[in-house]
Image (spheres, grey):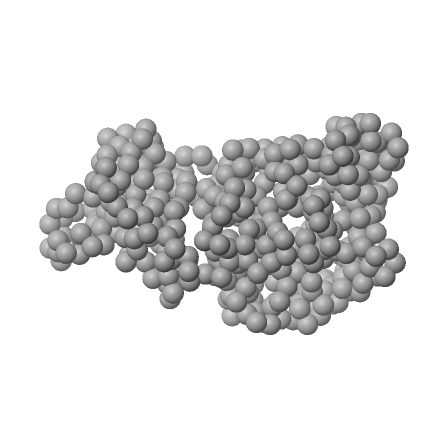
Amino acid sequence: MKFDYLAIGEEIDPEGYVLTTYSVKTDLPIEKAARAIAAEQSTGTWTDISTTSEVILKKLGAKVIEIEGGLVKIAYPLDDFDPEVGGIPQFLSVVAGNLFGLEDLKGVRLEDVGIPAAFAKNYPGPAFGIEGLRNVLERKDKPLIGTIVKPKIGLAPQRFADYVYEAGIGGLTNSKDDETLVDQDFCPLSERTSAVGDAIDRVFDEVGHRLIHAVNVSSPPDKILELAELAVANGAREIMVDVLTCGFDAVRVLREDPSIKVPIHVHRTMHGALTRNPEHGISMTVIAKLVRLCGGDALHIGTFGVGKMHGSALEDKLSHKALIEPFFGLKDVMPVCSGGVHPALVPDLIKLGGRDIQIQAGGGVSGHPKGVREGARAMCEAVDATVRGVSLVDYAKDHEALRIAIDKWGV
């Protein structure tokens, strides 16, 4: 049975559909390519079939509602989805499934998703978000400033905790495990978390400064709650999950578990496999929206094109927007800027992202010639200078840690 999936200009109720935007590269007429995507991802296949009906096609068939240049907008009926049981895995199977392998498409990229309230109501959103993190840290309006303990792996628990202590004494508000560190023998999670908790308490007792550290609990689905509960039992103030390697529902499961009452820091490791090619894959905007639905409190978004990691200022801006704009009444998510960050990048990051960001530096702290404490201090001085409207060069005249950082990395 033939069915026309192309319905450009047809009026639809957006609350009854998941709206998607794809950029498409093809030698076919764009209308034919768009129709192929809509068919493949809903009720069609590569040929006419005898097992369908007009009722099925009209109720569940996707509609191509707009084509503009290489951008195609497709509406999937809400009935195509199972938000409660199938959740995000089934959602992605529809909007980001077999279409990437269609032979007639040279490239196809899922740029955005419009999620209706009837789908979103099944998801919790962040427990803390930007305001909650600020409250935990008693930091009213300056950007959060964090580090990643370096080297990525290799430090024993006490040396690891010493790094966090030095970072806290230097003034940082956040630190975290690297995405590759979980519970290896050289740095077991329980011992590491306990030692870090003691270090954080020492910082507060000595200088009255609040710091939280995100403990990485990324693990298989049958282990992740157990590991998160172990971290919290050993004093974790925040946990971290690698969302793309663990799956979006790992974030949701942690968010909804009543024993996990700490913020969830979400790392996007592996995202480049999906986001890097501008003509094929999935945009960070989509990832950001799904993380927000599932309950992440902070998410890495890149550095607006100024750090070491590949990315464009535009894409980082769009994913930043997805974390902070109104979204079904859900709390906003703290955007985390990391990847090659050092003090000289701070003014650009604040200019591009505003003050509601977390600036995260690994090598930009531990690589400071005078060590972690002074590396942390230099980052804090860069933030202080920027929010006061003073150039880093001028501020560095009276702030040695920043001056040394500028001498090493430039300005």
Question: Which image quadrant is residue 216 in?
Answer: bottom right
Answer with the quarter of the image where residue 189 lies. Answer: bottom right
Image point (13%, 48%), residue name: 48
State whether residue 96 appears in this view.
no
**Residue 237 percent across, percent down from the top left:** 69, 62
| Residue 299 visible within the image | yes
In-image side of 12 versus 218 (left or right): left
| Residue 304 picture location, percent across and down | 58, 35
- In the image, 291: left or right of 98? right
Quarter of the figure with the C terminus: top right
Q: Tell me: residue 96, above or below residue 394.
A: below
Tell whether 291 sits left or right of 307: left
The answer to whether residue 1 is above or below residue 345 is below
Label tally: 0
| Nearest to the observer: residue 300 or residue 276 | 300
Q: What residue do we see at 41% from left, 34% from top?
A: 279
Q: Residue at x 22, y 41 (%)?
A: 10
Q: At x 77% / y 28%, what residue is drawn?
A: 391
Front-most of 112 and 2?
A: 112
Picture coordinates of residue 392, whole percent (x, y) = 78, 30
Residue nearest the viewer, comparing 47 with 344:
344
Q: Position of residue 318 (x, y in %)?
A: 50, 39
Q: Is the residue 194 above or below the residue 211 in the image?
A: below
